[in-house]
Amino acid sequence: MAAKMACAKSAQATFVFVVATGMLFEGVFEVNKLVIDGGIPLSGEIAVHGAKNSSLPLLAATILSGGECVLHNCPALSDVDAACKILSYLGCGIRREGSTVTVNTENLSHFDVPDDLMQEMRSSIVFLGAIAARLGRVRISFPGGCDLGARPIDLHLSALRQLGLDIREEHGYLNCVSDGRLKGSNISLSFPSVGATENIILAAATARGQTVINNAAQEPEIVDLAEFLNRCGAKIYGAGKSRIWIDGVETLYGSEHKVIPDRIVAVTYLCCAAVTGGEVQLLHTRPDDIGSVLPVLEEMGCMIRCSDDTIFLKAPKRLNGGGTIRTMPYPGFPTDAQAPLMALSTLSDSTTVFVENIFENRFRHAGELIRMGANIRTEGKIAVVQGVPSLYGASVQATDLRGGAALIIAGLAAQGKTIISNMCHVQRGYEDIEGNLKAMGAQVYWTD
Ligand code: UD1
């Protein structure tokens, strides 16, 4: 089912699934609008769940092991379900117990990923490198544009070609075949693309010889992927730095791994507390992973205290402006945190300027925030937010995952009722958002 159709479908507050080999995840979510009665200062503790953006490449990486892998702290999200559906289609056995997902990739019986499964999430492109490494043959559909604008995969394709994969683009499909094992290569990325770096690591882990990635992405999710693969017997060095070396090994084996905490979920809940003049203690988080965001929150007047795995935030009476925020590859300010911070800045006492350097169409939430009384002007990759004293509730639409999170943040502070439709976008990346907000004292509920 295509992403847009999945969104027409609804979401349910609770989800239940235990999947045996070959069984698909079905009808996981069933209501689609979130109602927020705003204006209540939030206060409480939130345990941050595992990172979506790590879980997806990790699930793809299990393919390389050819055995049983156990992933702990794997969040129950519709995007994770989509990755599990792909694994299931490929012939893997999958079982979820709580936040632990066990994948057995011994019997991989397909080398293709059907178009409807590919379209469920953009990150499915990481299956390209993983399947190519394991089977030497892949057929997947070409991922189209998405709600953040055009999302090309030229860097993925040229790197995989350098590793010896013959890729033909035919009728919207990528038909790929290699001459046996892939071959190590020296690859220089013109931009430190996260997805391309992941695909190269996956393809090179079992390639013949050494691969070097220059200008590699340095995101924590890259480090997590490399650590998992190294536990499976890979030899990957330098992950988290701009040059990564991979000494290809002949085979990998199954292993166990704990997914890192989701840094954008952490930012989102910090913003929820900050926007309402409240306070929050985040547990199971890693402050270092959002080292570029915490100083902005402090500049806006929030008091922040961190330990190794907790973050406490107390909001000021009125937020200051956030200055100029430029999204950059890690360790810069994350593009995924731009929308949540924009929602926060709408209520500050001055101006905040956002420069979106990663995606071309990532201000669609601004229009919805304006419907709630925000003062925002956008032009190309720049958005100028002039803080207002208050927002008002309105019927708004989640335009994408983080844009939806921004509307929740705004709705929590707005006077009156905010009704957010298309919540399926938000469910791609936030586990039990309603339950977590309620636990902090928010008045929030699902409706049809
Ligand atoms: C991006 C984010 C990542 C975030 C993820 C989910 C960056 C650098 N990446 O990763 O942190 O977790 O979204 O929201 O912030 N590009 C090309 N050709 C390619 C691949 C990418 O031109 O083959 C361009 C994209 O159009 C975009 C930029 O590179 O402008 C970043 O892309 P990339 O890092 O690959 O995106 P994701 O992997 O989706």
Image (cartoon, rainbow, N blue to C red):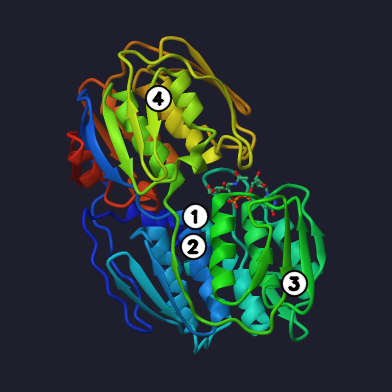
Secondary structure found at label 4? helix
Going from N to C along the chain, the mark reached first, 3 or 2, is 2
Foreground of the two, 63 or 254? 254
Cα–Cα span, label 3 and label 1: 28 Å
- Crowding at mark 2 (Cα within 10 Å: few <14, some 14-19, many 20+): many
Going from N to C along the chain, the mark reached first, 3 or 1, is 1
Q: Answer with the quarter of the image where residue 5 lies.
A: bottom left
Q: CB of mark 1 within 8 Å of CB of mark 4?
A: no
Going from N to C along the chain, the mark reached first, 1 or 4, is 1
Q: Is residue 437 above or below residue 228?
A: above
Q: Quadrant of the N terminus?
A: bottom left
* Numbered disc in front, either 3 or 1: 1
Q: Position of residue 354 (x, y in %)?
A: 56, 25
Q: Residue at x 33, y 17 (%)?
A: 316
Q: Residue at x 49, y 19 (%)?
A: 322
Cα–Cα span, label 1 and label 4: 23 Å
Mark sitting on residue 168: 3
Going from N to C along the chain, the mark reached first, 3 or 4, is 3
Foreground of the two, 347 or 166? 347
Pointer 4 residue: 344
Q: Is residue 378 left or right of residue 21?
A: right
**Badge 3 amino acid:** Arg
Pointer 2 residue: 56
**Badge 1 amino acid:** Asn
Secondary structure found at label 3? strand
Q: Residue at x 41, y 10 (%)?
A: 349
Mark sitting on residue 53: 1
**Badge 2 amino acid:** Leu
